[in-house]
Amino acid sequence: MKILCVGDVVGRPGRDAVEKLLPGLKKEFDIECVIVNAENSAGGNGITTKIAKEFFAMGCDVLTMGDHVWDKHEIKDYLNDCPSILRPLNFPEGTPGRGWCVISTASGKKVAVMNLIGRVFMRYNVNCPFKEARAAIDEIKKQTSVIVVDMHAEATSEKVAMGWYLDGHVSLVFGTHTHIPTADETILPNATAYITDLGMTGPYHSVIGQSKEKIIERFLTSLPVRFETATEDSRLSGIVVDVDETTGRAKTITRLQRRLL
């Protein structure tokens, strides 16, 4: 089965790219499951219930989040109500929402998705993502062998370590958060697909999605500056992974980036 994973969607330009490009990508690659990191989709910070529902209406199956998950306070109730939008699993016990889910595709195949957040250079005091992941996998495998992990983290070393740690235990580990696509997509020795970062879905005439003028001003002056989501050169970045739905072993991984014309 083919799974499409879309990198951090930034603001309206990113949402437009998903809406307009997703139908063609699903047809081109015969996609059965779409996973989107949506934590920057509301003006570059967080997500709203309305926007989450729009993603599902576009044909997205699971939304993952990250360190901006709490930026829009209204989303807390929706995280409890909707099983297909995830916050990082390794937030402390009692946090709203859930860290993994299992969905059924249109053809009846089951796919599990797990969301993790790193601890290196990140702003939250969270539980160990490595230990939390392994504990959850034992439970998930009672339902399906196809397991996809979004490792939302700043440090490339932490993402790479997670890939090796979960090699042979899950189908795919992809990184998000840094908004820069990496060129290290691979199938690890025990058939887990891996990439350090999917990249950003949003405006590329920018500094990781924000107005380049505002960011440059901040670097030049060291003064606080109100960020603004950029608008030009929207692109969709992500990967397509082919997974054996019986064994959960990854067969191929293809990096892609498409420009919204």
Image: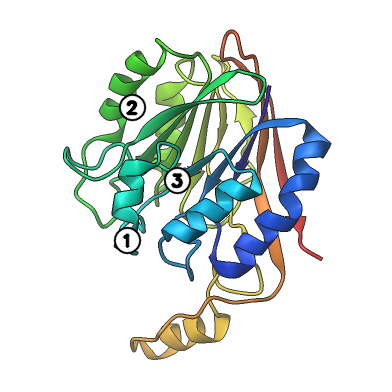
Q: Mark 1 points at which residue?
A: 74
The quadrant of the image that shows the C terminus is bottom right
Mark found first going from the N terminus, 2 or 3: 2
Dot 2 falls on a residue whose secondary structure is helix
Mark found first going from the N terminus, 1 or 3: 1
Cα distance between the residues tagged 2 and 1:
27 Å
Q: Give neighbour class at mark 2: few <14, some 14-19, many 20+ (Cα, 10 Å).
A: many
The quadrant of the image that shows the N terminus is top right
Cα distance between the residues tagged 2 and 3:
18 Å
Q: Name the residue under label 2.
A: 133
Dot 1 falls on a residue whose secondary structure is loop
Q: Give neighbour class at mark 1: few <14, some 14-19, many 20+ (Cα, 10 Å).
A: few
Q: Which of 176 and 99 is in front in this view?
A: 99
Q: Which mark is residue 156?
A: 3
**Mark closer to the observer (2, 3):** 2
| Amino acid type assigned to the residue bearing label 1 in the image | Glu
Please give the name of the residue rendered at 60% of the width and 18% of the height, measured from the top-left corner: 109
| Amino acid type assigned to the residue bearing label 2 in the image | Ala
Q: Residue 185 carries which label?
A: none
Dot 3 falls on a residue whose secondary structure is helix
Q: In this view, does 196 lie to the left or right of 94?
A: right
Please give the name of the residue rendered at 59% of the width and 15% of the height, measured from the top-left corner: 249
Please give the name of the residue rendered at 34% of the width and 56% of the height, measured from the top-left corner: 75
